[in-house]
Image (cartoon, rainbow, N blue to C red):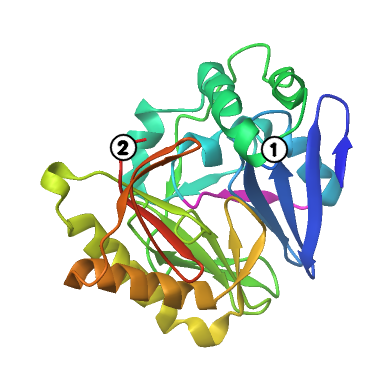
Amino acid sequence: KLRPVGRRLCEVTKIAGNTWCIGEFRLVNAFFAAGREKAALIDTGCGIGNIGAVVRELTDKPVEILLTHGHADHSGGIYTLPDSPVYMEPQDEEMFREMPATNEMRRLYIETRVPVRFPGEGHIEAVSALVPKEEPVYPKQYIPVKDGDVFELGERKLTVLHTPGHSDGSVCYLDSRSRILFSGDTVNHSIILMRQPDNDKRLIRIYHESLKKIWDYQEQFDQLAIGHDGILIDKSIVRDYLELTGGILNGSITGKYEEVGFRKGDVARLGQAELWYQCDE
């Protein structure tokens, strides 16, 4: 349920043993995974409200922040856990540095996303009131991660899979014990790949290879914990995205230009998969 706590409004949903989704006003998901010795916060939302306070209600163990990618709607809440180390794939560093979460970005995100993901009278005003009064201060450093790295939480581990496409540094975190893949924006109900020069297919091919990598691990997970528009989804969606991207690459599938909510660009759909593969916004 949505619950206000001080200047916070969020949804906290238990999805497995010692594992929760922390939904930031239904705009974006973060996931909290606790082990015997320490815990991991996978993504941090936009930084509207105080995700760190929510985490501290769930644990008193040390918490590490693991980013699935550097976009501001996933890294914006870092400031609420100033003592936690931040891990990120370094190919997203430039984006992380040059397009950080700012209060201006938070307000724009609220204005464009709330009507789509959290519709209802008065929600834009209510969520806007929780934007920090002053610009948060972000850490100047992060710790790089790479494909195959393992985070040991104590009788629980998370394995890094580098899965570029949505961004160059996108990663997923595999929790084979809970049989969950934390996929960030690598696999959602709807995926965005930005428009490429001359509409070439290089980025689609990169993303297709990332999907193949994920599917290579399909015996170790049953569900994906996704970044937006829901919480858990069956792993069969990966197969749909593989077929869809394969069809775009070989020419058997061609999308069309659409404008839906905040998305504008060329989109194709197949089964559970929706891919904005030449997206302008």
Residue 216 visible from this viewpoint: yes
Query: x, y percentage for residue 216?
Result: 41, 83
Residue 176 is left or right of residue 139, and the answer is: right
Helix, strand or loop under label 1 = loop
Query: x, y percentage for residue 2?
Result: 84, 41
Q: According to the image, label 2 marks what residue? A: 280
Q: Earlier in the sequence, mark 2 or mark 1?
A: 1
The residue at the point 76 percent across, 65 percent down is: 15
Which stretch did the figure color magenta? 61-68
Dot 2 surroundings within 10 Å: few (below 14), some, or many (20 or more)? some
Q: Residue furthest bottom?
A: 219
154 or 163, which lies in front? 163
- Residue 19's label in the rendered image is none
Residue 145 is left or right of residue 123, and the answer is: left
Dot 1 surroundings within 10 Å: few (below 14), some, or many (20 or more)? some
The residue at the point 52 percent across, 78 percent down is: 236
Residue 181 is left or right of residue 24, and the answer is: left
Q: Tell me the amino acid under the disc marked 2.
A: Asp
Q: Tell me the amino acid under the disc marked 1.
A: Phe
Residue 77 visible from this viewpoint: no
Helix, strand or loop under label 2 = loop
Q: According to the image, label 1 marks what residue? A: 118
Q: On the image, which quarter does residue 31 sit in?
A: bottom right
Q: On the image, which quarter does residue 137 sit in?
A: top right
Does residue 251 lie above or below 259 as drawn? Answer: below
